[in-house]
Image (cartoon, helix red, strand yellow):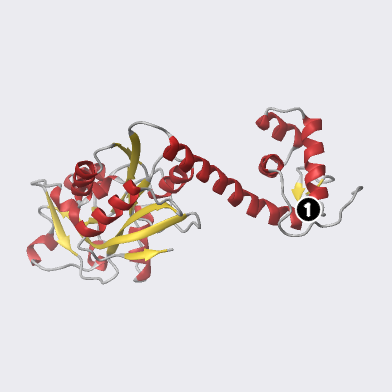
Amino acid sequence: MTGDTTARPLGYDMDLRRLRYFVALANERNFTRAAQVLNIAQPPLSRQIRQLEAEIGAELVDRGSRPLRLTEAGRLLHEHAVQVLAGVEQIQSMVVRLSTPGRRRFVIGFVGSTLYGHLPEVIRRFRETATSAEVSLLECSSVDQVAALKEGRIDVGFGRLRVDDPSVRRIVLADEPLVAAVPADHPLVALGRAVLLSELLAEPLIVYPRPARPSYADQVLGAFHDLGLNVARMLEVRELQTAIGLVAAHAGFAIVPESVQRLKRDDVRYLPIADRNARSPIMMVHRVGDVTPDLETLISISCDIHAGVVRGHG
């Protein structure tokens, strides 16, 4: 490429707008489509990318390839640019929330199965304590909670999946045992003891939720795979209630958190599982660096209600 390609020292001020343009180009792999996404003309986009390359001191895009390919330097910049821009958006969201006058809005994300445990009590006590906050609830998967936190759509999430992301802190509130949901007249019910996962595979396994992966379904399948067990027959459904209904209809069995036993049906029984790995964590997640008084109150309440046994992760 032409022009000054001398690399600038670390700490050189980089235009965030150019980073956004570059990320859009990296995602689209086409100048025309990227310009359309950014709602600008193509020549200004090309100039901005050239100027960014001059700042970096290296070519970022292989312009001779179709579709466009990132150079090694481009791939490295893209990986870090995504994190930088996500961090800036997160800071902006937190500043706006803290500076908005009047009643504060506090949004809690959750997966459906957590409502059978201690979460309702946590929310009740939080409402009683944080009286100046307008508490809203949003059901979303554990994976979706991470995106919702970054985008500022929720302030905290309660789920079951360990999702690793440097911008999100997770707290393990509990490690809940799993139980097997089987029809009331299933032969294993009469044994009056904890069952092994291997004893259940004569029937189809019903897993949920179907649309979002990875999910709790993968957690359940992992428990079987860790024991070297092959799940030959499986039925995927959208939600927990559907899975329990199909168990009652003799369509198979389901593996559910122990707290789901509160969902009582005359035609379904819940059997304890003897295998040690049959457990599911209850996770609380929030943005790294988010230190609002409401969040600190909710963390304290959640840890207290979940027996005070907490293992925090960065």
User: In the rendered image of this protein, does residue 260 appear above or below residue 93?
Assistant: below
Q: Position of residue 162 (x, y in %)?
A: 40, 59
**Residue kind at label 1, given as amino acid type:** Ile
Furthest toward the right, the residue is 2
Q: Position of residue 55 (x, y in %)?
A: 80, 50
Is residue 255 among what the camera can see? no
Q: Quadrant of the C terminus?
A: bottom left
The residue identified by callout 1 is 56
Mark 1 Cα within 10 Å, few/some/many (few <14, many 20+)? many
Residue in the image at 87% along x and 53% along y: 5
81 sits left or right of 170 in the view: right
Give whichever of 301, 36 is nearer the camera: 301
Is residue 252 among what the camera can see? yes
Q: Quadrant of residue 288?
A: bottom left
Q: Quadrant of residue 170?
A: bottom left
Residue in the image at 49% along x and 54% along y: 167
Give whichever of 310, 238 is nearer the camera: 310
Q: Position of residue 130 (x, y in %)?
A: 25, 43
76 sits left or right of 93 in the view: right
